[in-house]
Image (tube, rainbow, N blue to C red):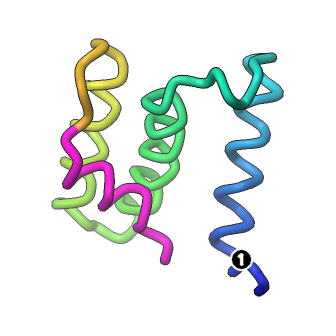
Amino acid sequence: MTATPSAMHMNDLASAARKRSGSDPDKLAPQASSADAAWMVLDAANDLGDHATIEACRRVIDASLNGRLVPQSDLHLVLDYFR
């Protein structure tokens, strides 16, 4: 099975985030990686004028910054945006 270019890009971003934080991948907080993905999706959604996705990204980022749980519907939208 080959990875799609967007899946490879997400893996590269996750790898870069791990290297930046110097953390063990098994100990990374799930919200930290979802916030990184949300920033990337936010940039693309802004370019496309996708207002619903922009709001979902903002909620994911806000929740991760404030230590709250990320709404599952927003999390799925962000993580599956490039599929």
Say which residue appears at 34% left-offset and 31% top-offset: 61
On whether residue 57 falls in the magenta region, the answer is no
Does residue 78 appear to the left or right of 12 in the view shown? left
In the current view of this chain or complex, which residue is farthest to the front?
Answer: 26
Residue at which label 1 appears? 5
**Label 1: element kind:** helix
Task: Characterize the local packing of mark 1: few (<14), some (14-19) or many (20 or more) Cα atoms within 10 angstroms.
Answer: few
Residue 9, horizontal then vertical, whole percent: 70, 62
In the current view of this chain or complex, which residue is farthest to the top?
Answer: 66
Does residue 55 appear to the left or right of 61 in the view shown? left
Locate the N terminus and report the quarter of the image it occupies. bottom right
Amino acid type shown at disc 1: Pro
Does residue 82 appear to the left or right of 55 in the view shown? right
Vertical position of residue 1 compared to residue 55: above or below: below
Say which residue appears at 77% left-offset and 52% top-offset: 12
Say which residue appears at 31% left-offset and 49% top-offset: 75
In the image shown, does 38 or 42 lie closer to the viewer? 38
On whether residue 79 falls in the magenta region, the answer is yes
Secondary structure predominantly adopted by residues drawn in magenta: helix
Residue 5, horizontal then vertical, whole percent: 71, 77
Quadrant of the rendered structure where residue 31 is?
A: top left
In the image shown, does 26 or 50 lie closer to the viewer? 26
Residue 67, horizontal then vertical, whole percent: 30, 14
Q: Which residues are magenta?
A: 71-83
